Image: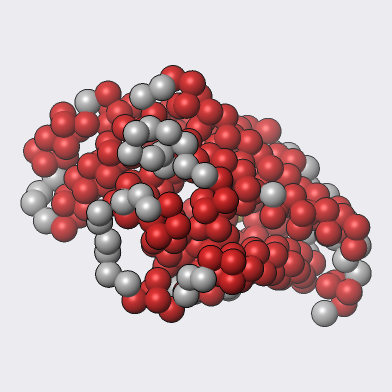
Amino acid sequence: MAEVSRARAIPLLLAVAVATATFPIRMLRWRLLLRAADGSPLPAAPLWHAVAIGFMANNLLPFRAGELVRCYAAARLTGERLTAAISSVAVERVFDGLTVVALLSLALFAADLPSSLVVGGVSVSIARAAWIAGLVSAAALVMALAVVLAPERAEALIRRVLPAGRVTERLVALIDGFRHGLATLRSPGRLAGVVAWSVVLWLVNAASFWIAFAAFDLPVGFAGALLLQGLLVFGIAVPSTPGYVGVFEAVIGAVLLLYGVPASRGAAYALVYHATTFLPIILLGAWSLLRTGLSLGEMRREPALDA
């Protein structure tokens, strides 16, 4: 593809380095969430290996299996309970969701887009979409605070409002795991640290998209990178192919079309960005497997553990 060959190497390599930096940031944040039984911090090295192995597995296995692989690796390498690792990842995902939606709301207000767009033959107001995203963000924050401050009442409310069934039980189980995971955040300083690292994580991730725009001379600013990131997170939220191949490129191409980027150039950007940021974590994860002696196949087959 001609568009791929015209990509500039220096901004692309810088974007890859910035994207890869999000993984140690994830480890630092996870270290605040997953603590030893006595509340002390766990060693950084085993948590880093678990992060590298888990995100490598996400790129190689379908249905986000890497999340369970990461939890299993952390339990094996630190000696902590698997349920504690799973609870901490559940809390991590809540902070991710709140942060991404908040940044998406800001992006919709700041993005240099027409006042309205035609999507599927329907005119969509950008201002209205921004207000809706803001309200969703505020509602999600209120719901999260309700679970934090009164988890038993939140569980009772869900059982009262929703009919008995699998969805209700999954929501209750999520609240229960969230509650156990939040037990490590009784310290206001630790909670503030998780919030701060969440913001840093997703700003750095958006910066990698923004820097990569320069490699293809795309006329999209940082607000566009935040918009792309937010819509991409929603687009790949449903577990699908290993590494989100196909869905990842489709969402990026659709967002860049909003900025008038030709489909061929948008496709080239998506393909190159995905391929180049895909490789480093696979290599880091493979190195961690060799260092720790763990087996990816063994972790996929291992039943749930609890000490």
Horizontally, is 175 left or right of 244 in the view?
Answer: left
Quarter of the image that includes the N terminus: bottom right
Percent position of residue 298, x then y: 40, 76
Between 55 and 160, the residue placed more toward the observer is 55
Q: Quadrant of residue 36?
A: top left
Between 305 and 181, the residue placed more toward the observer is 305
Report if residue 96 is visible in the image.
no
Percent position of residue 256, x then y: 70, 57
| Applied colour scheme | secondary structure
Percent position of residue 296, x then y: 47, 74
Quarter of the image that includes the C terminus: bottom left
Is 111 above or below relative to 263?
above
Q: Quadrant of residue 203?
A: top right
Report if residue 201 is visible in the image.
yes
Q: Going 88% across and 66% down the picture, which residue do you hit? A: 7
Q: Going 37% across and 53% down the picture, which residue do you hit? A: 79
Horizontally, is 194 left or right of 22 in the view?
Answer: left
Q: Going 16% across and 37% down the picture, which residue do you hit? A: 155
Q: Residue furthest top?
A: 188
Between 87 and 42, the residue placed more toward the observer is 42
Count of numbered badges drawn on the protein: 0
Horizontally, is 228 left or right of 141 in the view?
Answer: right
Is 7 above or below relative to 25?
below
Q: Going 40% across and 60% down the picture, which residue do you hit? A: 76
